[in-house]
Amino acid sequence: MPVRSVTTDARRAQIIDAATTVIAEVGYARASFSRIAAAAGLSSTRFISYHFTGKSDLMSAVVADVLDSIGTYVGSRVGKQSTAAGMLQAYIESVVGFIDGHRAQMIALAEIMLGAGFDEGMAGDRRATSELESILRLGQQTGEFRDFDPMVMATTVQRSVDGLPFALRSDPTIDCAGYARELVSIFELATVKAQR
């Protein structure tokens, strides 16, 4: 694989950021190279074509960028926890926190997934659900969590956070911290092992 220069990486990042902004503002279908070039401050769409083979390649890069950002943000917070219950709480709070603090990225991700159905996003969703399943299985093994189907519970947790960007589009004033607290409470009640 060829080594890219710092300048090349910086230009690619600039284009990805501009594409994210444009998609969030006008939607996937209207995110043309000319709009993206203008948002990036580029004099020509040729700069985009030099770095990306087409719209699909650029959209894949945007999806990968958002998923990497989420993974880093959430992973750093979940990794600090020592119990499965703490990990589950940190997962919910950090995903909601990321969504709240990175609304344009989340809108762009949803637009691309709905507009183009990218496999990269599906792979990221499967990875997130799999990581949640691991946390839930750990909680069952340690006796923190009751007996339930980890796949069903992980999917339910994931869908509850996945829905937030759509809710924010219709009501940007949603109290995201309150949303996270409510989800933590719901899934604590759903997973906790009853005391005998």
Image (spheres, rainbow, N blue to C red):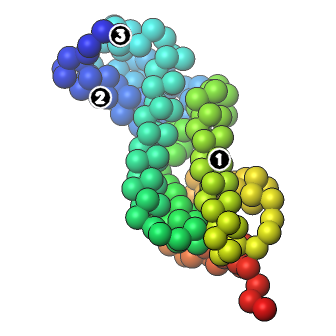
- Of mark 1 and mark 3, the one earlier in the sequence is 3
Q: Which residue is mark 2?
A: 14
Q: Between tags 1 and 2, which lies in front? A: 1
Q: Which residue is mark 3?
A: 1
Q: How many marks?
A: 3
What's under tag 3, amino acid-wise?
A: Met
Between residues 79 and 187, which one lies in front from this camera angle?
A: 79
What's under tag 1, amino acid-wise?
A: Ser
- Of mark 2 and mark 3, the one earlier in the sequence is 3
Whether residue 98 can be seen here: no
Residue 38 point in image, percent of width and height: 33, 24
Q: Which residue is rendered at x = 45% and y = 67% of the image? A: 81
Residue 192 point in image, percent of width and height: 70, 78
Marks 2 & 3, CB-CB < 8 Å contact: no
- Res. 178 image quadrant: bottom right
Q: Is residue 168 left or right of residue 152?
A: left
Residue 94 point in image, percent of width and height: 48, 61
Q: Which residue is rendered at x = 52% and y = 57% of the image? A: 95
Residue 73 against residue 115 in the figure, above or below? below
Q: Which residue is mark 1?
A: 130
Could you tell me which secondary element the residue under label 2 belongs to?
Answer: helix
Q: Say which quadrant the N terminus sits in.
A: top left
Q: Residues within 10 Å of mark 1 (few under 14, many from 20)?
A: some
Q: Which residue is rendered at x = 43% and y = 59% of the image? A: 79
Residue 20 against residue 74 in the figure, above or below? above
Task: Determine the CA span between mark 1 and mark 2.
Answer: 32 Å
Could you tell me which secondary element the residue under label 3 belongs to?
Answer: loop
Task: Determine the CA span between mark 2 and mark 3.
Answer: 22 Å
Task: Determine the CA span between mark 1 and mark 3.
Answer: 30 Å
